[in-house]
Amino acid sequence: MAVTIQDIAKLRKLTGAGMMDVKKALEEANGDQDKAIELLRKRGQALAAKRSDRDAEEGCVRAAHSGDFAVVVGIKCETDFVAKGAEFVELTDAVLAIALEKRGASKEEILAAPMADGRSVQEHITERSGVSGEKMELGIYEFVKGAATWAYIHPGNLIATIVAFNEAIEDQMAKNVAMQIAAMNPVAVTEAEVPEEIKERELNLAREKAREAGKPENLIENIAQGALKKYYKDFTLLDQLFFIDNKLSVGQYLQTASKTLTATAFYRASLVAE
């Protein structure tokens, strides 16, 4: 059965595959669209398996929120050329919509979740991998819960943030805090939540720097503790200077709306080398 241009165009629209791949699949399937789609899927699976040891450091991150739940997902690939493609961003948004709806407890739950056509998120990612010729994976899946939440996507789809609050918050204020997280990259909400290994790292760095500067040994520990306090101010969300008005910390900014308002959790997803 001869394959027509119309057949090729229809299958390309359905699958997003390249023209020659579509033409070959249709020829092998004797013009049967369903069989051709299955052939393209199988080739995608084979290609994904073949490239499983490749590095996938580029990609697209997207985030969304609804009421008490906010989620960020990131699909990774090998090149920024593929990452910036409309189909790749659309796939990421489709997975994000599933994640927002299902509120899965783990990445594995989201990968197993069915999409509109009944096939799983993992099957769709594998198929897209076959179309693009690159390794692809759901590299990021994180969520926060709170009385109120917000999500922010930085232009370029390489950084996205989600943040939870302990009580209702005005939209612009919530957005400003989410943007603060994107711009200033805090490591924790408060100093009490900074991981012990980071605290010890910063203390050791300060001690070494003080000794190199010739400071008396009996002052070293006080100097190190002072440096740690500065670290908290620079890298804990509530202590950071608010990027719009640096006369206030983020915590103080939130308290301009309510004395009890605070951020309770956040996540910053980034595919940027920092």
Image (spheres, rainbow, N blue to C red):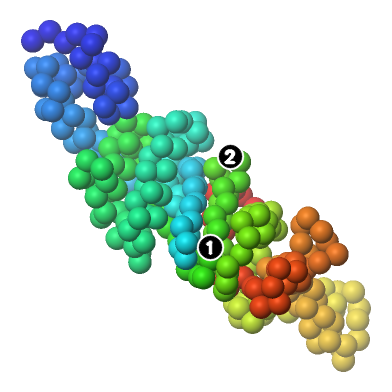
Residue 71 placed where, x, y %? 46, 58
Q: Residues within 10 Å of mark 1 (few under 14, many from 20)?
A: many
Q: In the image, is residue 183 above or below residue 80? A: below
The answer to whether residue 241 shows anywhere in this view is yes
Residue at the (47%, 36%) spot, across then down:
83
Q: In the image, is residue 15 above or below residue 77? A: above
Residue 128 placed where, x, y %? 32, 36
Q: Residues within 10 Å of mark 2 (few under 14, many from 20)?
A: few
Residue at the (65%, 73%) spot, across then down:
261
Q: Which residue is mark 2?
A: 156
Disc 1 is placed on an element classified as strand
Instruction: Determine the residue located farthest toward the bottom in the rendered image.
Output: 218
- Gap in angstroms between the C-alphas marked 1 and 2: 22 Å
Disc 2 is placed on an element classified as loop
The answer to whether residue 267 shows anywhere in this view is no
Q: Name the amino acid, label 2.
A: Gly
Horizontal side, residue 38 vs residue 98: left or right: left
Q: Nearer the viewer, residue 25 or 192?
A: 192
Query: Residue 110, which numbered label?
Result: none
Residue 255 placed where, x, y %? 72, 72
Horizontal side, residue 98 vs residue 144: left or right: left
Q: Name the amino acid, label 1.
A: Thr
Q: Nearer the viewer, residue 46 or 215?
A: 46
Q: Nearer the viewer, residue 244 or 261?
A: 261
Q: Quadrant of the N terminus?
A: top left
Query: Residue 149, which numbered label?
Result: 1
Residue 49 placed where, x, y %? 27, 44
From the image, state whether disc 1 or disc 2 is nearer to you: 1
Q: Quadrant of residue 234?
A: bottom right
Residue at the (30%, 23%) spot, across then down:
13
Residue at the (54%, 55%) spot, across then down:
151
Horizontal side, residue 5 vs residue 159: left or right: left
